[in-house]
């Protein structure tokens, strides 16, 4: 605007509008964060321990099975995997 004396009031009003928009955006982000926070707490306090409680014993079972069963085998040249010969564990 080229009207004398109107530059400052227009700039003040534009700054006020920009501040209102910024405040609305910040409020929307705070609302979204408040909405998601209980779900994050549920995941951290319930779902993660349930998964760890499920897969931890399974890992232990696989470890015990690996100790109790000969899992190494030698496959002769020209033979299939089903024809492999079991190898005992090495002795130190």
Image (cartoon, rainbow, N blue to C red):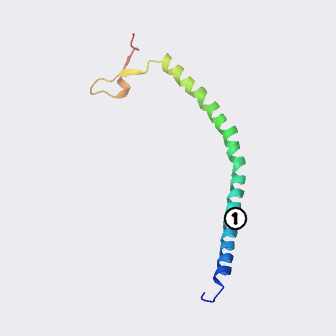
Percent position of residue 14, x then y: 65, 76
- Say which quarter of the image contains residue 10: bottom right
- Residue at 39% x, 13% y is 90
Q: Which residue is mark 1?
A: 23
Q: How many marks?
A: 1
**Left or right of 44: which side holds 75?**
left
Residue 4, percent from left and from top:
63, 88
Q: Position of residue 47 (x, y in %)?
A: 66, 39
Residue 44 horizontal side relative to residue 89, left or right: right
Outermost residue toward the bottom in this view: 3
Q: Position of residue 24 (x, y in %)?
A: 70, 65
**Quadrant into which the C terminus falls:** top left
Tell which of 24 and 72 is nearer to you. Answer: 24
Residue depicted at x 70% and y 69%? 20
The residue furthest front is: 5
Above or below, comparing residue 90 to residue 47 in the picture: above
Name the image quarter holding the N terminus: bottom right
Crowding around mark 1 (Cα neighbors within 10 Å: few <14, some 14 to 19, many 20+) is few
- Find residue 6 and report its image quarter: bottom right
Q: Nearer the viewer, residue 78 or 8?
A: 8
Q: Mark 1 falls on what kind of element?
A: helix
The residue lying furthest to the top in this view is 92
Q: Residue at x 67, y 76 (%)?
A: 12
Name the quadrant containing residue 88: top left
Q: Nearer the viewer, residue 8 or 74?
A: 8
Between 73 and 83, which is closer to the camera in this rendering?
73
């Amino acid at each position: 605007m080229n009207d004398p004396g109107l530059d400052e009031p227009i700039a003040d009003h534009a700054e006020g509008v920009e501040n209102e928009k910024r405040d609305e955006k910040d409020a929307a982000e705070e609302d979204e964060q408040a909405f998601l926070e209980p779900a994050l707490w549920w995941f951290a306090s319930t779902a993660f321990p349930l998964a760890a409680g499920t897969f931890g014993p399974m890992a232990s079972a696989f470890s015990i099975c690996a100790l109790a069963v000969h899992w190494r085998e030698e496959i002769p040249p020209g033979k299939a995997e089903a024809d492999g010969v079991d190898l005992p564990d090495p002795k130190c």
